[in-house]
Image: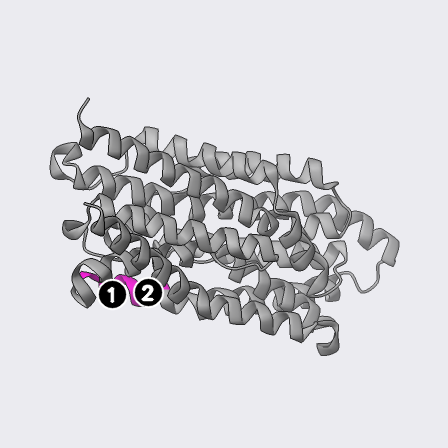
Amino acid sequence: MSKADIYLYILIAIALSFDFLNGLHDAANSIATIVSTRVLRPQYAVFWAAFFNFIAFLFFGLHVAQTVGSGIISPDLVDDNIIFGALMGAICWNLITWALGIPSSSSHALVGGLIGAGGAKAGSSAIVWSGLLKTASAIALSPALGFILALLLILIVSWICVRKSPLAVDRFFRTMQFVSASLYSLGHGGNDAQKTMGIIAVLLFAHGGHNGQFNVPFWVVISCQTAMGLGTLFGGWRIVHTMGSKITRLTPMQGFCAETGGAITLFLATALGVPVSTTHTITGAIIGVGAAKRVTAVRWNIAKDIVIAWVITMPMAAFISGFFYSLLSVFQ
């Protein structure tokens, strides 16, 4: 086995470690509402979410993997050092925000990592601007769409249930939250796991695999879905607390509407090949259902802190990844 092959396997292992951390960090996106409404205990909720995270590949194409692998930086410029720098930037930022309980975006940390490492190698010429602009626009569009859909759903459901007793409504939506949580976990697994698939696929491309053609082998699909599912099993309890109870208090009906609005947003983004933030999406949806009750039901100071984390995620991950790329280059 050559030195290049050993390095390739190490980088694949690091990529799968990032996917595991992505599941760990973003478990809150899938389970925060169903846990905060006490429909499921946390230990059962993570199993529920992990299962639907894993089977997501059965329902979605690989458009997001194509965007991440070839639509952020030029695949012809990709080498082992760029992938290492990008992954380390994303992993370090995920660990920092996870330790602080901040629901930042693993997706945009990875995109920022690619930009930082690619920029350190070739400057702005490394960036595929069309793909980056599509991804950057989703920073604003995904939470906005989640907010609007969740707001509309809560208004529609409230009108339908106006003659029902609060106890009957609560009982019905406790059951329906199993459906909405499943849909959101499917959307989470379908969009987020594909980002690591794209990283591994472009790494294989850089090593001349598959006759120089960019594609995503099935073993990469299964490996990434498994790593994300395992990460979700370990949960991200600090972020669950932030998402599930600090932003606004949720009822089962509100939890259902937030998860369903978020799931629809993720399904649309995945179908269009846009790597969106599941964190941004569910946060926007939770704020939407809270604001539908009354504006003061949302703790806007917490929402403001989350938005600040969104804004700095890409540049911070880019800075860290550029540092690791430069550091590695010095020792070669």
Q: Which mark is residue 302?
A: none
67 vs 289: above or below:
above
Whether 131 is among the magenta residues is: yes
**Residue found at the far bottom of this picture:** 295
Contact between labelled residues 2 and 1, with CB atoms less than 8 Å apart:
yes
| Quarter of the picture holding the C terminus | top left
The answer to which quarter of the image holds residue 59 is: top left
Residue name at image x 59 percent, y 42 percent: 182
Quick one: SS at disc 2? helix
**Quarter the N terminus occupies:** top left
- Report the predominant secondary structure element of the magenta stretch: helix
Is residue 130 in sight in this rendering? yes
The residue under the point 16% across, 52% down is 77
Give left or right: position of 249 versus 76: right
Query: Residue 98 location in percent, x, y?
Result: 56, 53
Give the amino acid at mark 1: Ser
Q: Pointer 2: residues within 10 angstroms few (<14), some, or many (20+)?
A: some
Residue annotated with mark 1 = 130
Q: Which of 23 and 87 is in front in this view?
A: 87
Residue position for label 2: 134
Where is residue 213? Give x, y as percent: 15, 39
Q: In which quarter of the image is residue 250?
A: bottom right
Whether residue 64 is visible to the viewer of this picture, yes or no, is: no
**Viewed as shown, does residue 85 lie left or right of 157?**
left
The amino acid pointed to by label 2 is Lys
The question of residue 88 being in magenta is answered with no
Alpha carbons under labels 1 and 2: distance apart: 6 Å
Q: Give the range drawn in magenta.
A: 126-135
Q: Nearer the viewer, residue 169 or 106?
A: 106
